[in-house]
Amino acid sequence: MQAETGKKMNRSSTFMAEQQDGLFPAVCPLDCPDTCGLLVHKRAGKIVKVEGNPEHPVTAGAICNKVRNMTERIYHKERILYPLKRVGRKGEGRFERITWEEALQEIAQRYHRLIRDYGAESILPYNFYGNMGYLSVQGMDRRFFNRLGASRLQRSICNSAGTVGWNYTMGFGGGVPPEAAAKAKLFIVWGGNIVSTSMHKFMLIEKARKQGAKLIVIDVHRNKTGERADWFIPVHPGTDAALALGLMHVLFDRGWTDEAFLSSYTVGHEELREHVKAYTPERAAEITGVPAEDIVRLAQMYAEASPAYIHIGNGLQHHDNGGMAVRTIACLPALTGAWKMEGGGAFKSNMAYGAINGEALEQSGLRTNPQARTVNMVRIGEALHELEPKLRSLFVYCANPAVVAPDTERVLAGLMREDLFTVVHDLFITDTAKYADIVLPATSTFENTDLYGSYWHLYMQLQEPVIPAEGESKSNFELFKLLAEAMGFDEPAFRETEEDLIRQALDYAANPYLRGMTLDKLKEQRFVKLNMEPLEHRPYLDQLTTPSGKIELYSRQMEEAGLPALPTYIPLTEGFDGRRRPRPDGGDPYPLMFISPPNHSFLNSTFANVEKLAKLEKAPILQIHPEDAEARSIRDGDPVVIRNDRGQFEAAASVTERMLPGTVVSQGLWWGKDGKRTRVNALTSGRLADMGGGATFFSTVVEVERLKE
Ligand SMILES: Nc1nc2c(c(=O)[nH]1)N[C@H]1C(S)=C(S)[C@@H](COP(=O)(O)OP(=O)(O)OC[C@H]3O[C@@H](n4cnc5c(=O)[nH]c(N)nc54)[C@H](O)[C@@H]3O)O[C@H]1N2
Ligand SMILES: Nc1nc2c(c(=O)[nH]1)N[C@H]1C(S)=C(S)[C@@H](COP(=O)(O)OP(=O)(O)OC[C@H]3O[C@@H](n4cnc5c(=O)[nH]c(N)nc54)[C@H](O)[C@@H]3O)O[C@H]1N2
Ligand code: SF4
Ligand SMILES: [Mo]
């Protein structure tokens, strides 16, 4: 293949890391649905440029600006290159260099002592998807903590509320694949900002628009995707289920439903038809802020477009009622029969198509403490203070809870505990690492071997080291092998290689889509498409794994779980609907809804320390409606403080009509800097969503004031 530079890509997977010059294949490891194929340019042994791999069938050579600047991160002057031990106070960030031998011995000794005195449950791993590689976060690390007998972690900070909600309706955790989506004539992006968070899907939509397709964005603020839409529909936060129910009312009422489809493929359509009579467009308008005539127009466009595709974003899922919102929206395509046509239907995640053999990777049989408790990662602030028996050690990797977890003040107070032994494995002294007793240097993805799936497209990819490990850094895989050895764990599971684990991950008869996927093929081709043949023999709609095998508009499972069996609008616990109802306790100290979604140039809190990207985002900004600004004598550019009972956050006001009055928005997860209050999660709570133990970042109420200087 001829790449842009005219140089030939090196396909041989042996010793890429040792070659000084050339062009090498790689995979983007970040928590982004697109999982791009990359090309890494090396000169004199160093990476000089990262670009998209034009051969990748879906991402096709385009990558985001974040990853185009990846070299700034890999060779950042603050990257940690050897193990460190804390010498200052917790939070101060003063460390001294130690050897790996010392670090491993100290951790092993502390862990043996904790296990003897308090039991292994006193130790909690805390990780998320800082690196999406299966070996990075679902491999040796899981084996290690299973064998240790540590408390287990419920990894629910991202999308688990919606996943449960989707599954109640559809059963199977896969939606419309990209190849089919390209054929849609109407795209509804609902609670997502795909221009920033899934750029290749936006590119796909742009292409379809050239053929006449339309894009509608439903969001609480006109984000970058809303700016580019044919129709942007602003809603009050947490009211989407009411909007969907209003649409259902119109669809049934006007006879715009596909009755044959409803009879063949759903259960509960008669109950639903009755149920939604109460959700007139007028009532839905009152709740959502969307005018009744717009609800009718939207229902008509949805019914007439064929095929129509709904993208369900994370904005819906980070609310008290997030599970129900997703469950409700997931019912819409069944009313019009959109699923019948190629490209019609909905997408929340396509991860299920590529499901790997997670059990082979983590080996739950190694568990020395099968009864170990499970701690919800969303509630880490509370867990560090209140859990009994106490947590006495936190092992953080691939995550930055001091910035990303809700209720920052509580998290930090927990991390300050002198009796908490904290280990952080990362590439940088993150806000979390500042509180660590031991900091361990992590490799970047380009220094690792790993296997990647995608939660949007259908290709798996292999990463092999393109450069040697920087300094003394080690991959997660290697680290947990070394720790197992230091702890004296001698099971064969800890002696296996990366390639052994990749083979085990791919050997999974339970997933027909994985049939034929092998390590050898991945080495040869770099990206290999899942085997989609099963869909040809047995259509998607015949594969649903709900108890009835149909789309469950009425769900007995939900009823059994104590939830409404039919899609229902449930107001937020904190906050207001369109009637601006005061809080149930009568008080109204925090009249504004505070939404804190990701920004364009960071990936969660990753890249916030890369100067070039931080400069593009300038500083934390609070978008506030002119009415709300005027009521508080706030002018554009003014410094403001945003407060509630949990904490404070400071930003520069941007007075804008992007939202309905009553909602303020600040994008981006900034690190704390120079004692400034730059972390949005100081305001958010550890309250859990209605399903899946999910986070409720966006169900937050605040007051805003001009900051006196
Ligand atoms: N550039 C960039 N890309 C990313 C990330 C990043 O940090 N930066 N993060 C990655 C990760 S981990 C994830 S999970 C995905 C998330 O990506 P998306 O699924 O696109 O979700 P968010 O970016 O969280 O966008 C949420 C949108 O929902 C809106 N919203 C909030 N509340 C409501 C509501 O009640 N109703 C409606 N209709 N809208 C609401 C917000 O205004 C925001 O525009 O992106 C991934 N990609
Ligand atoms: N207010 C608010 N809070 C949010 C969100 C929001 O929209 N608003 N979004 C939420 C969502 S959807 C998510 S997914 C979470 C994300 O939360 P996290 O997964 O914690 O995301 P990051 O902040 O990117 O932190 C990842 C860390 O992993 C490190 N890392 C990268 N690669 C490796 C590796 O190979 N090994 C090790 N050991 N470390 C590595 C990175 O340097 C980085 O410090 O945040 C959540 N928090
Ligand atoms: S962050 Fe997403 S868009 Fe950017 S390179 Fe990675 S996978 Fe591609
Ligand atoms: Mo996420």
Image (tube, rainbow, N blue to C red):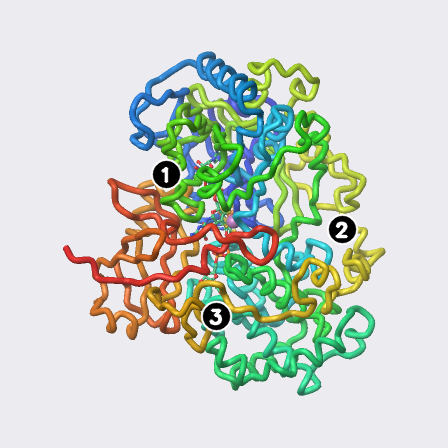
Residue 171 versus residue 360 in the image, above or below: below
> What element does badge 2 sit on?
loop
| Residue 439 in sight from this viewpoint | yes
Q: Quadrant of residue 563?
A: bottom right
Q: Closer to the N terminus: mark 2 or mark 1?
A: 1
Instruction: Say left or right for 52 vs 626.
Output: right
Q: Is mark 2 within 8 Å of ligand 3?
A: no
| Residue 12 in sight from this viewpoint | no
- Label at residue 555: none
Residue 139 versus residue 280 in the image, above or below: above
Neighbour tally class for label 2: few under 14, some 14-19, many 20 plus, Cα within 10 Å: some
- Label at residue 413: 1
Q: Closer to the N terminus: mark 3 or mark 2?
A: 3
Residue bearing the label numbered 2 = 532
Q: Is mark 3 within 8 Å of ligand 1?
A: no
> What element does badge 3 sit on?
loop
Which amino acid lies under the numbered mark 3 shown in the image of this protein? Ala
Per the model, the C-alpha gap separating discs 2 and 1 is 49 Å
- What residue appears at the point 71 percent right and 79 percent down from the top-left corner? 273
Q: Quadrant of residue 536?
A: bottom right
Instruction: Say left or right for 337 vs 396.
Output: right
Extreme residue in the left direction? 709
Which amino acid lies under the numbered mark 1 shown in the image of this protein? Ala
Per the model, the C-alpha gap separating discs 3 and 2 is 32 Å
Which amino acid lies under the numbered mark 2 shown in the image of this protein? Met
- What residue appears at the point 21 percent right and 67 percent down from the top-left corner? 635
Residue bearing the label numbered 3 = 229
Q: Position of residue 173 (x, y in %)?
A: 69, 53
- What residue appears at the point 52 percent right and 54 percent down from the top-left corner? 198
Q: Closer to the N terminus: mark 3 or mark 1?
A: 3
Per the model, the C-alpha gap separating discs 3 and 1 is 43 Å
Q: Position of residue 675 (x, y in %)?
A: 25, 41
